[in-house]
Amino acid sequence: MASAAVVAASVVVARGGVTRAAADPEANGSCRALVVHPRPEGSASRGDQSANGSSASRGKPLAMADPVADTLIQYRKQFPALEECVHLISHSLGCVPAQAKEDLCEFFDLWRTKSITAWSDWLPEVDRAAARIEKIISATPGTVIMQHNVSGIMSVLASCFDYAPERNKIVYEALQFPTVSYVWQAEQRRGAKCVLVPSQDGTTIDTDAMCAAIDEHTLAVPISHVVFSSAYIQDAKKICERAKQVGAHVILDCYQSIGTVPLDVVELGVSFACGGSVKYLCGGPGAAWLYVRKDLIEQFSPRVTGWFGNEAPFAFTMPEQSYADTVWRYMGGTPAVAALYQSRAGQQIIGEIGVRKIREKSLVMTQACIDWVDELGMKLNSPRPAEIRGGSVVFDFVGAADVCRELNRRRYYCDHRPGAGIRIAPHFYTKREEIELFFGELKKIRSGTGR
């Protein structure tokens, strides 16, 4: 892949020359021994009851319904923070791997010992991080660039387009994450026309209605793969097929799917895809990513740009931008390198396990959560069918926001979204009994008993 040399002080870093298959450092952080969560006093789980409802022996481990998925629990030891809480919040913030501390120390030590010459180590990490994402989303090498967040990515992509009256329509779901909508609504100042496809039930989006809204006037379709407020999986492939028929570009926001729902961006046929490492990738904030279909990379010249999108950043040419001929043209300013080190361990773990195995376990665990929601008579606001259910379960009841706050105070981590309810998401490192513990604690809070 051709690119110019990057020169900082007396340091030369060939961005395009970074070997994408280079091995990442092995995780070698020490982890404390796993401590099994005690069952809250006075709570009996459904898994501890016999067929006639009598209580069985407490603390007996519950077997996973899927023996293959159950093997993933071995990775739990890499997340010692799980010893101190019930972590069902991976849809919002994945648990921190112990190795992330060591990786951040590596970044710090490079800064401390090499000063300006640390850039010879730091800049290749951008391509290494991109390669880790490419593996997870089945992307062609050289089609992913790292960014800071999806808001910025959407702004970059929106700046790629001109909104001629004959093709200025932007189509997306009314359940889209607000930050995405804010960006595209602002583009109406430049001539865009936003069309939102409504949800009939507040949970799902009718795929036929979405496709019907996409016509010859449509320029871009910035949609969520998995809806943040309900975990509904959209039929991205069908939407992409419709967009292709009329010459529109699908921009797939994969933040709620990457790491828990298998992704193949090439097979789906998207023009662009994006996401980050905050959630199921367990990488914390600051390591977002953008995928650009290979044949489109040089087709666009984003107005939202910066010196690292230049073909030769350290040549300091003026006054106009000369874009790189690689996916780096979508970069912008200086990369947030520390976040790339911080996110490395989570991405490596997900890549090692494979998302298909994670999905197998997720379906078993989310079904267990749904069973609890039904038993407690709460309103389910996420899909029941496995084929359209993402990695989280959403449910609501009167006073849910207050109960959520108290659960978090007690370190039973979840979140609440207005109009949706409490969201929870077991992940590959979740133990089945933690679901029992969570709902047991929720019952106690609602009844006014316990702490």
Image (spheres, grey):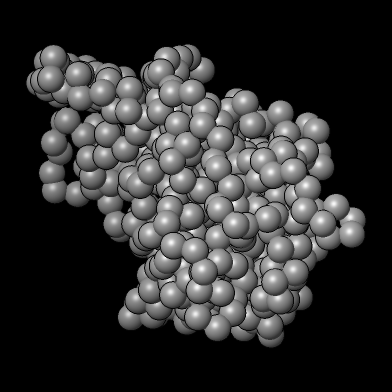
Residue 128 pos. (x, y %): 42, 26
Question: Relative to 18, is 304 on the left or the right?
Answer: left
- Residue found 50% across the figure and 48% down from its top: 87
**Between 314 and 150, which is closer to the camera in this rendering?**
150
Residue 264 pos. (x, y %): 67, 43
**Between 128 and 398, which is closer to the camera in this rendering?**
398
- Residue 319: in sight, yes or no? yes
Judge whether 176 appears above or below 399 on screen: above
Judge whether 211 appears above or below 338 on screen: below
Judge whether 447 appears above or below 41 on screen: below
Residue 26 pos. (x, y %): 45, 14
Q: Hey, which residue is sitting farthest right in the picture?
A: 51
- Residue found 65% across the figure and 53% down from its top: 436
**Between 206 and 389, which is closer to the camera in this rendering?**
389
- Residue 297: in sight, yes or no? no
Image quarter where the N terminus lies is top left
Q: How many numbered discs?
A: 0
- Residue found 70% across the figure and 50% down from its top: 365
Question: Relative to 309, is 373 on the left or the right?
Answer: right
Image quarter where the C terminus lies is bottom left
Judge whether 254 appears above or below 145 on screen: below
Question: Relative to 34, is 148 on the left or the right?
Answer: left
Residue 155 pos. (x, y %): 36, 61
Q: Quadrant of residue 244?
A: bottom right
- Residue found 69% across the figure and 85% down from its top: 200
